[in-house]
Image (cartoon, rainbow, N blue to C red):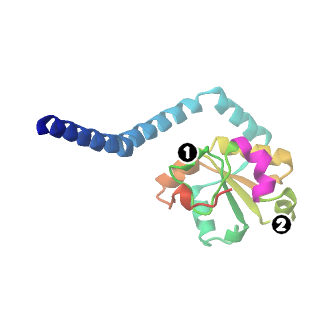
Amino acid sequence: MDTPNLLISSRLKLFQTHNIYHRSVIVPCYAQAYRKFSQSHIANSRFSELVSKVRESYPIQEITPKELHASLNGNTSTVTKPNIILIDVREKDEQLRGIIPTAIPLPRGVLERDIERKVVSIDEVNSETDRNVILYCAGGLRSIMAAESLIRLGYKKENVKSLKGGYDEWKESGFEVMDYDSSKKT
C-alpha cells in the first residue's frame, strides 16, 4: 500500500518542482522573447506610423536612460531630482516585472483621467519652468503618445518628456529597477 502513495508523492514533488521552474525560468524567458518580437513587429506596424506622425506634429522631447539616470542622481544641472515627476504608463502586468525607482505607476489607459487627481496638476507643472513630467513605457512608443496627450491636455511641451527606449533600454543599460510592490501606489 505504501508503494502507490510513494509513487504519487514523488510524482507530485516532481510536478511541483517542474511547475516552480516553469513559472520562474521558462515563462519569463518566453515573455522576454515575445516582448522583443512584438516590439520589432510594432516597429513595422500602423502604430509606429502613428507615433511618427505624432513626433512630426508635436515634437516630443526625449531623454535617454543615461540622461535620466544622471538627473535622478543629481549629476546634472539641467534637471534636478525634486523637479522630476517620473510616470510609468505601462500596464500593471508589465509593471509587476519591475519599475524604475521613484516612478509613479499610472497606466496609459487612465493617464488623462487620473494625472491631475493622483500625480500633478497642469498649473503646478506649467508654473515652474524646470518642472518635468517624464513618461516611460516598455519601448518608448506608448510614452510618446502619452506625452502628446498631456500636451493636448494643456501641459507645456517643454515640460513633458518621453524616455527614449523606455524601461527595456533603461534595464539593458544596467540601471536600477525595483519591485512594483516597493513603488508608490496610486
- In the drawing, what numbered circle is on residue 128? 2
Q: Give the magenta part as a residue range.
A: 109-119
Q: Position of residue 135 (x, y in %)?
A: 68, 52
Question: Label 2 neighbourhood size at 10 Å, few (<14), some (14-19), many (20+)?
Answer: few
* Residue type at numbered disc 1: Glu
| Quadrant into which the N terminus falls | top left
Which image quarter: residue 141?
top right
Residue, disc 1: 94
Which is nearer the eye, 177 or 53? 177
Task: Find the distance from the CA under tag 2 to the CA under tag 1.
Answer: 32 Å
Residue shown at 76% from the left, 56% from the top: 118
Dominant secondary structure, magenta: helix
Between discs 2 and 1, the one toward the N terminus: 1
| Quadrant into which the C terminus falls | bottom right
* Mark in the foreground, 2 or 1: 1
Eyeballing the image, is 160 above or below 108? below
